[in-house]
Structure formats: structure tokens, C-alpha cells
Amino acid sequence: MAIISRKKLVFRIAPALREYLSGYSREFELPLQYTDLILYDNAVPLYAKNGRDTLWETVFYPASEAPEIYENLKRIYADLKANGDVSVMQHLHVDRVDVCTYGNTKPFRVRIVNQVNDNFDYFYIKIADASRVYGLELEHLLSPNRISYLTFGQTLIEEHIAGIPGDEFLRYHLSESTLNPIRLSKEFVKFTERCFVQLLGDMHSANFVVVTMPDFEDVHYRLRAIDFDQQSYEARRSVYQPQYFKQNNLLIELGMKFMTMESVRQYQIEERSLIANRLRTERQRIQDLLSVMIDDTISTPANTESLRNELARYYRNSAFLRCRSMGEIVKTSLELVLTH
């Protein structure tokens, strides 16, 4: 079973990482920061359509400040979605601002509505944690998914990743007649392999979404991580392998029923091959990122030593024992993909 530390440390963005983010157009001067949003003067619980408490609260700002805050939030949305083109703001309005009161860093979620067609979207404003930034960037470069995010000072802006929350999917959708258990099991294997290679931890069912895509004969699935706080932080190898979280047991049982060990191994090899291709395609950018990550502090010395020892035993590869930082451990993990 995977065990997570009770509360992860938050690491500020260091100058070298800031330079990388600026060089690849992730650092953007924004009209508002996280600290501006914590000055709300009232909040009410937010309930789902079925009456369930979402553990989010909708916040309200003083009447004298709310118009400016909402206007700046629309500008941030334009920065995130349209590279700062404010013409997209014409038909948008801020419908709601929510805060997650149970999270370590208390992120804000902004709901944006298009007044012409009532279509809506979300984005998130968070405290910028270097671990999370590395996770977002690695996901963008090494997975089949593109990630939009921006940083400014110690503020992080993230796009909303659409999909059915994993825990909800396992609770309500596994019994559907349209379910293709083999394709879902295959995607879970590939997802677990991506997480393990890049050392993205804590991928239990509440931290990923399931995206269903109709194919011409059936349904295709993709699992997407939505929480990147545990990028290369924890000490235990099992934290980076989603199959060891009890919350994912229904997916494990599905795989055991519909897949053989040979097919599991085949899909693991296929995914590592795809990651290797992405590494070659993005060689310079990956090198730039890892050179910064290697010298950065994104975990504790004890966690780093424990993880390098566990991975050395798991892979039977002494190269991990020479790693002095989490960045070096990730670099060594990626090098194995290229050499096998």
C-alpha cells in the first residue's frame, strides 16, 4: 500500500526555474495574484446538484473591490487561453469564485461563463509550488496531454482539465453497458507507467480524471492526472505507482479479470517507447528543465536517499545510488527509458 506524508512541504520557485519558465513563455505578468484573492469578506458552502457538500466554498468580495477583481480574472483567462488577446473577454463574465478549504494550499477556482451561449469554463489560481510546476511541465512534455499554465511571482494559474473524476467513474460508470473493460484496463496500465517513469506520485482515483472518447466502433479512454503536488517528493517507490493505492482497487480487479501478464508487459513497453519518442522530440527542452531540476530542492534529503535506494533495488541499477537530488533521480529514470 502506498503511504503519503501528512502534509507536503511547499517549495518556492527558485531563480533558475523562473528563468526556464520565462524562456518557454510560462512566466507572464498578471494583473492579480493569489494573495489578492484571500481578501474575501464572506463565503458560503458549495453543494453539488445532488446536495452533496463539495468541500469548496463560494467566496464574495466587498462591493467596492469586486468589479476590479472580476475584470482582472477575465484578463488572466485571456492570458491563459488566448495569449493575452483581450478581445475574447467581450462576452465573458465571472460567474463564481470558489476556494478549496480542505487543501494544503487552499486553491481558488474561477468559473467563467460566455454570455452568448452560456458555455462555461474553469481555471485555478494557486500558490506556486516548484514541485507542482515540475509536474505540470513533465506532464506537458512526456504525456500525450498538453497542459496550459502560467506563473507570476509565487502565483500559479492552471487550466481546468476536463473529465469524469476517477472516484466518481469507479463508483457510477463501471456497470454501464457501454463500458469496454479491456480498453479501460489498458489505459490504466499506460497511465501507471507514465506516472512511474516521471515519478508523479499520489495518483489515487481522486487525483485523476477519466476522459471517454467515442471511436468509430467503440469507446476509447484516457486517464489524466489533475494533481501534481506530489511530483518527486515522497520517499517510497509505491507512491509513484498508482496500482498500490487501495482507492484504485476496482481498476486493478478489472485488469486482473480481463488482461494477462503478457499483455500488461506489452502495454508497459509500448508506453515507454512513446515516452522515449517524446524525449527525443523535446530533447533540448527536457535537458533545460532537468538541468534546473537537478540543482533545485523539491524534497527532503531523507526522502531523496530513501527513493534512490528503493529504485536502485527495483531496477537493479546502481546509477540511482549516485543521485544527490530528486531531479537527478528523475533524469536517471528517463535515461532508462532511452536505453531499453
Image (tube, grey):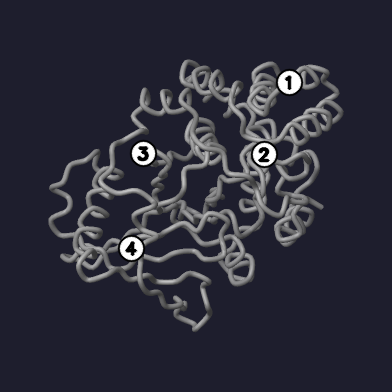
Q: Can you tell which of label 2 and label 3 is closer to the viewer?
A: 3
User: Which amino acid does the dot numbered 3 rest on?
Assistant: Phe
Residue 171 versus residue 329: which sits nearer the camera? 329
On the question of residue 269 being in view, the answer is yes
Q: Can you tell which of label 3 and label 4 is closer to the viewer?
A: 3
Instruction: State the CA–CA distance, disc 2 to disc 3.
Output: 23 Å
Task: Tell which circle, 4 or 2, labels the residue nearer the N-terminal end.
Answer: 4
- The residue lying at 44 percent from left, 80 percent from top is 49
Task: Tell which circle, 1 or 4, labels the residue nearer the N-terminal end.
Answer: 4
Instruction: State the CA–CA distance, disc 1 to disc 4.
Output: 43 Å
User: Which amino acid does the dot numbered 2 rest on?
Assistant: Tyr
Q: Position of residue 286 (x, y in %)?
A: 51, 22
Under circle 2, the secondary element is loop
Q: Position of residue 43 (x, y in %)?
A: 40, 74
Q: Can you tell which of label 1 and label 3 is closer to the viewer?
A: 3
User: Which amino acid does the dot numbered 4 rest on?
Assistant: Arg
Instruction: State the CA–CA distance, disc 4 to disc 2.
Output: 31 Å
